[in-house]
Amino acid sequence: MPEIYLGELEQIVLLAVLRLGEEAYTAPILEQIEAQTGRKVARGALYTALERLETKGCLRSRVGDPLPERGGRARRYFKVTPAALRALKDSRLALLRLWNGLEQIL
Amino acid sequence: MSHPRSPASHRELRRPGPPWLADRLLRLALRSDIEREMVLGDLEEQLPQHGRRWYWREALAISAHALLRRTGTTGDPRRSGDAFMYTSIKDVRYAWRGLFKRPLLTLTVTATLALGLGANAAIFNLIDRMVFRPYPLIDPDRTVLLAETGPRLFTKESVSLANFLDWRTSAGTITRLSAFQWWDANLVDREDPERLPGFFVSSDFFDAVGVRPALGRGFVRDDETFGRHHVIVVSDGIWKRRFDGDPAIVGRTVTVDGEPHQIVGVAPPRFAFPDGAQIWAPISFDPQKPPARQNRSLTVIGRLKDGKTLEDAQAEMAVLADRLAREYPDTNRDYGARVYTLTQGMLDEGTGPLLSLWQVSALVVLLIACANIANLMLARAAERRREIAVRIALGAGRARLIRELLTESLMLALVAVPPALGVAWLSLRAIRVSMPANIMRFVPGFESLGPDLRLLGFTVGLAVLTACVFGLLPAVQASKAQVSEALKEGGRSSTGRQFLRRGIVIAEISIALPLLVAAGLGVLGTNRFLNGPQGYDPDGVLTMKVVLQARTYPDGASQRRFVERALDGLAAVPGVEQAALINNPPASGSNSSRAIEIDGHPAPDPKNPPTVDNRLATTDYFSLMRIPIVSGRAFTAADREGAAPVVIVSDSLAKKYWPGEDPVGRRMKTGKSWMTVVGVCGDVIQDWFNRRNIPTMYRPLAQVPTNYFGIQVRTAGDPSVLAGAVRQALLRVDATQPVFEMMPMRQALSERTIGLQYLAAIMTVFAVLALLLAAVGLYAVISCLVTQRRHEIGLRIALGASTADVLKLTVGQAFNLTIAGTAIGLVLSIALSRLMEAGMLGVASSDARVILGFAAILIASALLAGYLPARRAAAIDPMIALRAE
């Protein structure tokens, strides 16, 4: 299987989705990212990232029940795929190895 | 949602929905259904928390993201450098700075483009105003014109009153059906009698064109009843000029065509439909006596009912015409009906092609301008070879480089837009000022010529297109730069690019020549019209028109009386040498013809007898106009009423019907009367376009009276000086009889050919522009060549080449390019002149001398353009040129 390359925003989105578990749809993902990183992500950028991650096979989505407050539309919930999980792990390991021994400096 | 409800009503019900427009925007921007549903749902869910402004902001941002994603620039992070917007802004800034870094290049390109774009903008405005929306006050989408179609397929015919009335009662798809008919009104008030361009119109006329009278009312059905029809509406101009803008004008009675008429309304300012009308009166008929059905003389307009289309109206009218054809087979068999948009229906057939010819010529000029600019850009790209090569070596993408260079071209083109609009404005003013008012009224839209938003849009659009044309080739060329070669010290230009530049110059020269030839043929043709032999002598002749009022001059006797008294009165005016009348003077635009029968030569087809032009003239007409009497005699005072009917025939008539014989003493017949030929006169050019040396018979006006004619007066000096005295003399004969279109014969000739003069003048401007641009292009190429070959030329001079040798070398190159261009241009010119000959009714005749003459002019100017840089080459100091290495 070819290696998946993950950009920074993509990693952040995937981690936020993982943290939210079953409740991962747009609004909580945005809140989660803002709460944990203190950084505000443009909604449009998030949609772009979500779409791309799904095409790359990093995310799968399912559609919930139609809700009146959404004008009769359903929420779309996201779930991280095993492949993306592997890529995240690799990325984490690589970073950890690089961090190793640098604790004093930083 | 804002209805007062019970306090316990659900919050959701009072919640405002998402902004409609923002919602549409998102739907447009988001292509995938799944994503669209998600985004819209998310936003709506959080709308109550954040509000509508937030929704708008998010919608715009998300749409921008989605669009950028689709253009692919924010896609793969490994491919994209910077964001599209960011780099574009950088390009624009870079190009803007570049404009000021090379002011001379910018100025040259801007000036060239301003001329090319300006010429196109001016012609576009002409087409836009005259062809697309000639009637500023009338709604062009809903107003239609209806015509009958004759037995021959698709001939557009006028409509008979009876058919119009039937249409009016039956039509369901068109409302406000209204007819109008030409009317020369003679208005008499406190001042002089004045002949006004007027129209008889039916009751709904003003509603049909969607115009409400500024004062009073339009016409109602009752006005159409014969006997109650003496009411008029006058134009804003007449109201202000003749009635001092009197606000109580409605209800006043004035004399029109000898009868009292009540003014019931004043048209709004600028309204002069149709054909510059200034006075309107109702079409009237006696309801007891049904009007004739075969007399077709009306133009019919109407408005489409709401929700109905032109096709609906067309279908209905076809059925209606079919029904009428069955009910009235005698008059309506083979007649159909057709519906046009008003603009299309009123358009003069010649206008479109003529204006297209201009637009094509203007585009050719712009193309030459583009070629020149492309050449300059190629030269500049050559200078930047090193810079571009370095950037490629450092990893700049080719597409990115092309985009940057194109941005530069685009900036150059856009900078040229304001001066181009200035050029267009000046040209349009010149065109409008030089058009005589009595012709302008027949050219709808001409008065409203001038810059507007559409013109601005057109010019900007054309500028962008132009930038692509002149920018793409140099940009692609420059981006091809070979890194290793360009970076080599002292690398000289490759020959490939020179080849391209020479090709461009050859192309410029080859399209400039046909333009020159076309303009030249036009000018020569016009000159021949104005100053060539006419068959009569137009100098010193004052001409004017009279249409006798039917009430005062109902019969031949009264008409004869007017003619005699007028001739006597005119002869008494000091400075008048001779005076004469003729029904259709030359260059008057009018004509009449009659079927004839030659004694002893019966027509081969009695149903289809030969026709000749019919002229009714007074005794002195031939000597006044200096038309030679070839044989026999002119008219004398003895050729009067009651005397034996006589006729004088033109030379062409004599040759056609009595070939090889002398017609004097022979007889011919028109109508019921036999006439004896007493003389043969020279042929004249009645009208340069279609009535040159046409067989013509002249009869004495005294024997065949008429109620309309032109008066000719021969004067000792400048004819316009006597205009006032001549008018006074005629007013003394009848103070209520208007005299119109009084002008020197020369002016009448000029006005008849005004269209051709415009054609020639505008083509000349284009041709001179083309010649100039081609010469400049050649100059630039040779100049560049000399600069690049400095080293070589210096070496040659050092080795003993003389000034003449160097001149021969460089001018020779200019010569080769010119000859190649001229050769291609000659072929194009011959083809074009054939086309003009065929398309312009023999106005232009392709003349080998003209074509060769212009080729010589072109070659001479090109050689001059090549000589200037050549002299610079000859002056090269070999020491300096060689040391520079």
Image (tube, coloured by chain):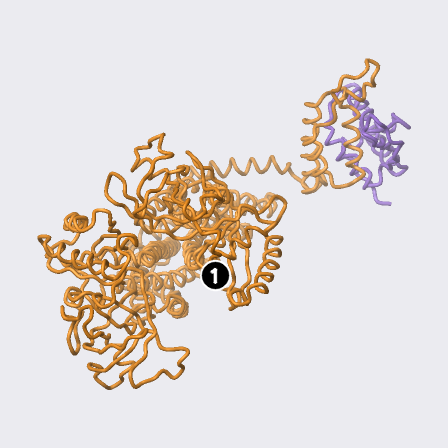
Chain colours: A purple, B orange
- Please state which of residues B321 and A85 is positioned toward the viewer in this rendering: B321
Q: Is residue B421 visible?
A: yes
- Please state which of residues B638 and B719 is positioned toward the viewer in this rendering: B638
B391 is higher (above) or lower (below) than B790: above
Tell me where residue B283 appears, x and y as whole percent: 43, 49
Quadrant location of residue B633?
A: bottom left
B845 is higher (above) or lower (below) than B746: below
Tell me where residue B719 appears, x and y as whole percent: 16, 54
Q: Amino acid at mark 1?
A: Glu
Label 1, on which residue? B157
Left or right of residue B754, residue B506 in this image: right
Quadrant location of residue B760?
A: bottom left
On-image quarter of the N terminus of chain B: top right
Residue at figure coordinates x 17%, y 71% from the top left: B639
- Please state which of residues B179 and A29 is positioned toward the viewer in this rendering: B179
**Chain bearing mark 1:** B
B601 is higher (above) or lower (below) than B335: below
Residue at figure coordinates x 24%, y 69% from the top left: B684
Left or right of residue B500, residue B520 in this image: left
Left or right of residue A63, residue B827 in this image: left
